[in-house]
Image: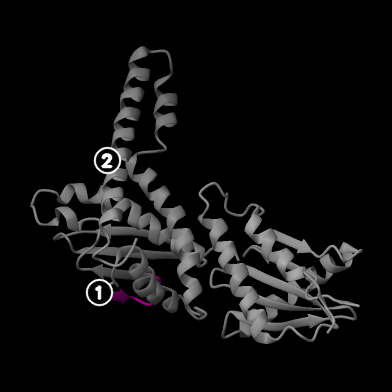
Amino acid sequence: MTAAGTSLPFELLHAEMVMYAEEKGKQREEDRKKLLESGLEDEKLVTRAFAHHNSITYLEGVGWRVGYVMGEKVSREVPRLATELEVMKFVCKELWNNCFGKQVDNLRTNHQGVYVMHDNHFITVAPFAGDSGYLDKSSSFLAFPCGLVRGALAALSINAIVTTTVETLPQVKFHIQIQGKTSK
Amino acid sequence: SEFVMAVAVALIGRDNSRLYTRVTEREKDDYEVQMFIHCTLDIVEDKLSKATELYLGLLTSNHKYKSFGFVANTGVKLILVLSLANTTLKDTDMRAHFKRFHLLYTNCLSNPFYELGKPLKSRALDDASADLFRSTPAE
């Protein structure tokens, strides 16, 4: 993951990851249906067994581990991050630069644990942003980045929920809701 | 007579789990050093609250050892124990050693097979520790 211009390898790899995750998801769905139709297992049991994962949670999980490591790696380069706001600014600048090729364009907060990061040209959705009709696909392409941000925050002792909203691609808003610090 | 550079190195997780500890073979009684590291950890908590940078400097000393500390932004703690008599290792050397060990730690994290929170197994860390403990003859 490097600065824009040499981001192609990551874009391609990430696109393949999303396709792979969705294929896995389709396969699981087929397996679930087969199991239900076979009548061999109780329906409730099957539903519960298959409830855990889908392509989105899978990608988010992968992103978390990557984000955790990136949090550790990139925070080496900066002085002590003493406050929550300093951590958020670090995420917007150094972390975003290292992982997504640029800095966040705008950071807003209500100073009560909610932060919104605007990225006007987000790397994972940029490849299909020009053509209309892909808006509903964007959530699959934002799962890994959400996980990455959540993992990086976890590495920096911040427990948060990270979600995205999209109105017009390639602009993406990341919503970070702090849940309170993780155990020290 | 030989001049010992360092006695022990320890990497401790944010939750105070022992991720990696190495004590020089020269220390016949490992127990004393381990207890000293344990005491040092208490001092780290205290110093951390007032710290403005990652390197914490000299933490504590007893009749045999002195310890230096470093806490990364992620909360992972590095402790270096030197023999009290050691005067050659300066602050700049300590900072360099901590930087090196922290880099090796992040390399361990980058290993996808490493389970977060588990003890670290790394040849690079072992080599760096051996390097640190190597004695230099008195001049």
Confirm whether residue B16 shows in the render. Answer: no
Q: Front-most of A121 and B7?
A: B7
Q: What residue do we see at 43% from left, 59% from top?
A: A67
The image shows residue A150, relative to residue B52, as above or below, that is above
Residue A94 is left or right of residue B117, and the answer is left
10 Å neighbourhood of mark 2: few (<14), some, or many (≥20)? some
* Of marks 1 and 2, the one in the foreground: 2
Residue at position x 25%, y 69% in the image: A118
Answer yes or no: is residue B90 visible: yes
Report x, y in % for residue B90. 70, 86
Q: Amino acid at mark 2?
A: Met
Residue depicted at 28% across the width and 70% down the height: A102
**Up/down of B65 relative to A61, above or below:** below
Residue A117 or A10: which is nearer the viewer? A10
Q: Which residue is mark 2?
A: A19
Q: Which quadrant of the structure image shows residue B33?
A: bottom right
Q: Is residue A131 left or right of residue A165?
A: left
- The amino acid type, in three-letter code, at marker 1 is Asp
- What residue span does the magenta drawing correspond to? A106-113
Q: Relative to residue A54, is residue A130 depicted above or below? A: below
Decide if residue B16 is on the left or right side of residue A16.
right
Q: Earlier in the sequence, mark 1 or mark 2?
A: 2
Residue at image mark 1: A105
